[in-house]
Amino acid sequence: MYALDVIQKELKEDIERFGRVTHFKKGETLMRPEETLSHFFVILEGRVKVSQVNFETGKEQILYLLSKGDMYDVVTLLDAKEHENIVLALDDVKLLVFPIELFREWIETKPSFNKLFLPYVAKQLRDVETLATDLSLYDVTTRLIKLISRNIEKKGAKQTLKLINNLSHEEIASLVGTVRKVLNRNLQKLKEDGLIDVKRKEICLKDFQNILEHLPDA
């Protein structure tokens, strides 16, 4: 959100000259890899998943989810090479699209943008590092609990889930590096333990504190 605020407030003139708003329907591919060589986008509305797929097996690994204020594709922005990710709209999505060279110019000449951009890159690196660590060191149950805990959002006295709310079980499975059958067993176990309730695509939190106590020591 902070990135979006800075872009809108301090780079207003460039936005009006070079930016264009684009809409995608749920399920549509946002940009093909070759398109990210020339364009860079900021999400205004909706959720986007970035994933890799083994087309021989059909298995998908979701690398991260993007939402309002997030930017893509940072890797191509920095190394100017095609990045073979699949970028798909999870909701109806609204994007602010720019020529990628404009973003490179901002990095070089706009201190206000650069101050937010480097921490943003660091966060994405940490997120991918966390994913690699989770897949290597923890079982599916722990990975699922960690995913839930990272997405807990407080709304008054109530705890809900952000980003992963309403995702299909296939997509949740792809986030934690497993398949739907194994995920369903783990969801059922958490339900039996009284930590969550599951209603279709909804994961409802029942015992917030106990979920946190199930996290591995840092």
Image (tube, grey):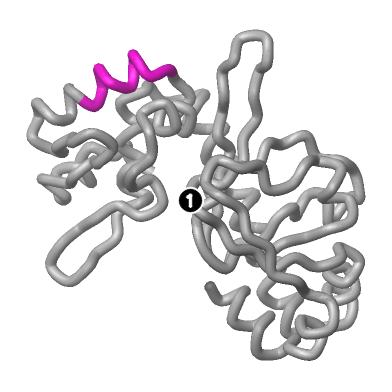
Helix, strand or loop for the magenta stretch, by majority: helix
Judged left or right of residue 17, residue 51 is left
Q: Is residue 206 magenta?
A: no
The amino acid type found where label 1 is placed reads Asp
Name the quadrant containing residue 72: bottom right
Position in image of residue 184 (x %, y %): 28, 21
In the rendered view, tell whether residue 51 sits above or below residue 93.
above
Q: Residue furthest top?
A: 56
Residue under the point 23% across and 41% down: 203
Mark 1 highlights which residue?
A: 91
Name the one closer to the observer, 214 or 33.
33
In the rendered view, tell whether residue 174 sits above or below residue 153.
above
Residue under the point 79% across and 90% down: 13
Count the marks: 1
Tell me the magenta residue range: 179-187
Judged left or right of residue 34, residue 92 is left
In the rendered view, tell whether residue 68 sits above or below residue 192.
below
Position in image of residue 58 (x %, y %): 59, 15
Position in image of residue 79 (x %, y %): 89, 50
Name the quadrant containing residue 199: top left
Judged left or right of residue 75, residue 94 is left
Element under disc 1 = loop
- Mark 1, other Cα within 10 Å: few <14 / some 14–19 / many ≥20: some
Name the one closer to the observer, 164 or 215.
164
Judged left or right of residue 200, residue 104 is right
